[in-house]
Image: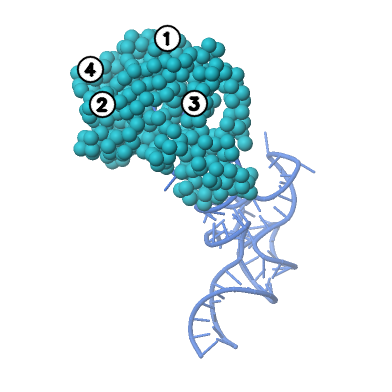
Chain colours: A cyan, B blue
Amino acid sequence: MKFELIFSDPGSSARAGCFYTDHGGIETPVFMPVGTAGTVKAVHFKQLIEDIKARIILGNTYHLYLRPGLEVFEKAGGIHHFNGWKKPVLTDSGGYQVYSLTDRRKMTEEGVIFQSHIDGSRHAFTPENVMDIQRSIGADIIMAFDECTPFPCDYDYANLSMERTHRWLQRCLERIKTTEPRYGYDQTLFPIVQGSVYSDLRKKSAEFIAAADAEGNAIGGLSVGEPIEIMYEMTDLVCRILPSSKPRYLMGVGTPINLLECIAMGIDMFDCVMPTRNGRNGMLFTRDGVINIKNEKWKLDFSPVDEQGTSFVDHAYSKAFLRHLFVSGEMLGPMIASSHNLAFYLWLVDEARTKIISGDFVPWKNIMIKQLAQRL
RNA sequence: GGGGAGAUACCAGAGCGGUCAAAUGGGGCAGACUGUAAAUCUGUUGGCUAAGCCUUCGGAGGUUCGAAUCCUCCUCUCCCCA
């Protein structure tokens, strides 16, 4: 795999590039829709490709390992054959579940024992078998097994956890090095920077991760409840250390504004459940601000869902009808909102890319951020 | 014609002498959601000059220190038998 840096913005640290995988190139900056269970909730792949223009989606090691299970992936010949998604797939390692399912797991130096949220059965995850699982699932990009630290997190624990994540990374690297791609295409490992909200830890972690010389690097443990300024501060600090010749992936971020601010700092890849989850809950992101489509104010608004939107759903349906679908609990509502939001997110990163290449990124970003902050 | 049950907030429906501006569910209104245990969760839902006050439990009277709760009459619903 290879990352090609196409253009660097002179006015910021933003850059445009392309990450090549055996399932196709990924133009950056990119937003990667989250498809935890092998599906981007409420959205067809045909639509993701043709309408939303998604270039890569996520899957999740913990969730896919539990259900449908590795036998299915191995017999199918990998996730692309199983679910029909032919573009690249990145799988998260389960490191986020160490955080989100904290009361259902026990962590030791060896790894983590999760108690399944589905049936209560216990499953040991180690850096080694998490690599094996992601190879079996068939991910193009495999994430290192880490601990996403919570917020707040005291310094001593953040330090201890970061050091353990580093040790786990060595084990992940060793395992990847000594095993083969499962289905004939390349599978590459991205390590993850931790260090919570502490500058010295973040610096130390970024240096450690950079030294691993992977084909891409990720920043984790942010947007877990810390003030947004601190998230920016940590992201900026880490971006200055991670090599510019490799894509930088900010995990779990974020709002449209977060994306623009972090693109300006040099982030190339993002993923977040926000466009899909918040969409299912009636929140629409538009270039003019945020809409809660369930609000009564849209009851008689027969204008398109988003007049400037790039998705067909933006023009095929009215706000009043979409509100009706949500108020009635009709499943088409969450489907339309998810499609709209993802199309908007992909439009946003595409537009950022265009502006970076044309040299107008910063002024455009500043105008956009003001608009995006509005509530409609 | 005879006998019985009942009328409570937007709807359904608890409450049966004070702790009731009134449970609970639905509906309405609003909020939250950042590497997804989420088509989820939370708040609110009589009025006001708002830690207080005012007007409410079909209508009109009455008993009582005190009534959604007890009594009388009226109006209206529903059920059973002829």
Q: Quadrant of residue A60?
A: top left
Instruction: Give the SS element for disc 3.
Output: helix
Disc 2/disc 1 C-alpha distance (Å):
30 Å
Left or right of B65 on screen, residue B43 = left
Query: Quick one: label 4 or label 1, which is nearer the N terminus?
Result: 4
Disc 4/disc 1 C-alpha distance (Å):
25 Å
On the image, numbered disc 1 is attached to which residue? A241
On the image, numbered disc 2 is attached to which residue? A185
On the image, numbered disc 4 is attached to which residue? A177
Residue under mark 2: which chain is it in? Answer: A
Left or right of A317 on screen, residue A6 = left
Disc 2/disc 3 C-alpha distance (Å):
27 Å
Query: Quick one: label 2 or label 1, which is nearer the N terminus?
Result: 2
**Residue at horizontal 59 percent and vertical 39 percent from the top:** A307
Asked if residue A219 shows in the view, the reply is: no
Residue under mark 3: which chain is it in? Answer: A
Query: Quick one: label 3 or label 1, which is nearer the N terminus?
Result: 1
Asked if residue A52 shows in the view, the reply is: yes
Q: Position of residue A347 (x, y in %)?
A: 50, 30
- Of circles 3 and 1, the one toward us is 3
State whether residue A4 is above or below residue A256. above
- Of circles 2 and 1, the one toward us is 2
Q: Quadrant of the N terminus of chain A?
A: top left
Residue type at the position of mark 4:
Lys
Q: Residues within 10 Å of mark 2 (few under 14, many from 20)?
A: some
Residue type at the position of mark 3:
Val
Res. A349 mark: 3
Residue under mark 1: which chain is it in? Answer: A
Disc 3/disc 1 C-alpha distance (Å):
23 Å
